[in-house]
Amino acid sequence: MSVSDTIWPAAPLDAVDVAFAALTSDPAPLSLDLDMFGPDDGLPRGFVALPALRDWLLANPRAYTARDAVWRELIRRARLDGPQWVIAAVGTAMPALRRYARRLSNGYSGDPDDIGAEILAGFLAALRDHVDVARRAPYASLCRAGWRAGHALRQQASEFVPVEDVERVTGPRTPQVPYGHPDVLVRRAVRLGILDADDEQPYIDVRLGRRAMDPIAARMGISTDALRMRLGRIDTRLAEALANGMLTGAASPQAAEALAAQAERRASLRAASRRRLSTTTATSTAVA
């Protein structure tokens, strides 16, 4: 079965099931080479098609180490290797997502497919941006995100009370005022040299937007561990600046000069590191 010849169902979870079947059917089913994982994980060996791998994970619910290893790899590929791996990740999690959809749709007065769509949207958002693969149980985090999204829709539907004219409803209607934005402090930190300009958007994406580090590090051309350590150092500098009032008050000329000197040293160190990396890469290419 090819994806182009597929008849797509309207229900979102059904559509993912069909796409997953198309990607994992013969003659070239999407597979994982399980030899990349450690022998102590207890996983089968060699290339295993994803439906068979899903069945193995379901049959071994206490294989926590194996499940974490598999899901870290699926998340990494979904973020970096194309949409087919996004479908692969969702399809592998489909038994849990369908179970959540059934539970949340029980007694729901709206369209059950809406619940499924919200569960899928929550799962995909976590898969794309939010789950930290360095932590334990990434699969559980993905599933919780899907459940929360579906549950929020269910709660929203139960709390909705129709009125004839919203403009005549009595009682307070407090507006959502966008105040207290931490990104304003981040911008001030960049101006003062506490935070380097190249790090501003990655810091906002990870720390404020809670996005995943892997694709951001890949775009920056550094490892995820390097980005994690860099952000940790930024956290320390920002905490110190907040504690001494530099971000919320006026910085003295001496303090501003010291911060500028520190930023210049960081820039010099990074430039030297890039030069060493470029030289090493060129030498390796020449030898090869």
Image (cartoon, rainbow, N blue to C red):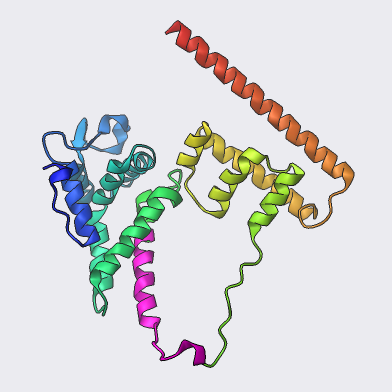
**Whether residue 149 can be seen here:** yes
The answer to whether residue 158 is magenta is: yes
Answer above or below: position of 275 versus 73: above
Please tell me which residue is depicted at 26% across the width and 45% down the height of the picture.
88
Characterize the magenta stretch by its predominant secondary structure. helix
Q: Position of residue 239 (x, y in %)?
A: 71, 51
Nearer the observer, 8 or 150 = 8
Answer above or below: position of 175 versus 230: below
Based on the displayed image, in which of its 4 quarters is residue 255 positioned? top right
Please tell me which residue is depicted at 50% across the width and 37% down the height of the picture.
217
**Whether residue 63 can be seen here:** no
Please tell me which residue is depicted at 58% across the width and 81% down the height of the picture.
174
Q: Position of residue 112 (x, y in %)?
A: 24, 71
Nearer the observer, 139 or 204 = 204
Nearer the observer, 91 or 201 = 201
Q: Is residue 213 left or right of residue 63?
A: right
Locate the N terminus and report the quarter of the image it occupies: top left
Answer above or below: position of 63 versus 81: below
The answer to whether residue 190 is magenta is: no
Q: Position of residue 138 (x, y in %)?
A: 39, 49
Please tell me which residue is depicted at 33% across the width and 39% down the height of the picture.
82
Q: Position of residue 61 (x, y in %)?
A: 25, 51
Answer above or below: position of 28 versus 99: above
Which portion, as a residue range, is magenta? 145-169
Locate the C terminus and report the quarter of the image it occupies: top left
Q: Is residue 97 left or right of residue 239?
A: left
Nearer the observer, 198 or 35 = 198
Q: Is residue 87 left or right of residue 145?
A: left
Q: Looking at the image, which residue sits at the far top?
A: 287
How many marks can you see? 0
